[in-house]
Amino acid sequence: MKLLKFGYVVAASAFLVACGGGGDNAGDLTDFSTNIDEWTVKSAEPGCSTGGAEKWVTIIGGQAPFRIRNSSPDNLQVDRTEVTGKDPVFKMTTLGGCAEFTVTVLDYHSRVVSIDIKLEEGDEEEE
């Protein structure tokens, strides 16, 4: 009987080791960031921007899939709402206007990285 119990313990231990333990942490919990933490775009002309400025964002660390949340879709277009793969990147394009807002990236573990966006008014022309 003792041998049978010992066999069950060994089998259960082998199963837990094979599946990674039994905790709920899947994957690597390394640092999680993006290549930028803020982006300021100043209009080249007086007044608020008409848009068209682009910036590529690279996600560093964390665990895919990554979700991208844009808090101001009237001022900024993000080319995707989810990113996966070996080199996760996404593109942001300004749509115009003056505004301050945040783009948020969440990884699989719901860890958050924020990118502060500022779309600023251009200088007045002197006559």
Image (tube, helix red, strand yellow):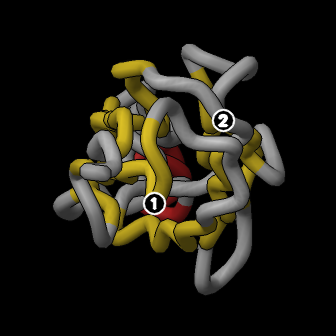
Q: Is residue 11 left or right of residue 127?
A: right
Tally of numbered tags: 2
- Label 2: which secondary element: loop
Given residues 115 and 20, the one toward you in this image is: 115
Numbered mark located on residue 15 in the image: none
Residue occupying the point 28% across, 63% down: 36
Image depth: mark 1 or mark 2 in front: 1
Decide: is 65 above or below 77: below
Residue 72 lies, in percent from the top left, at 60, 17
Q: Are marks 1 and 2 in contact (CB under 8 Å)?
A: no
Q: Which residue is mark 1?
A: 44
Q: Which residue is mark 2?
A: 96
Decide: is 44 above or below 127: below
Residue type at numbered disc 1: Ala
- Residue positioned most to the front: 127
Residue occupying the point 21% across, 63% down: 30
**How far apart are labels 1 and 2 at the CA level?**
12 Å
Residue occupying the point 72% across, 75% down: 85
Residue 52 lies, in percent from the top left, at 71, 59
Residue 4 lies, in percent from the top left, at 50, 40
Q: Is residue 84 visible?
A: yes
Residue type at numbered disc 2: Gly
Q: Is residue 9 visible?
A: no
Given residues 78 and 33, the one toward you in this image is: 78
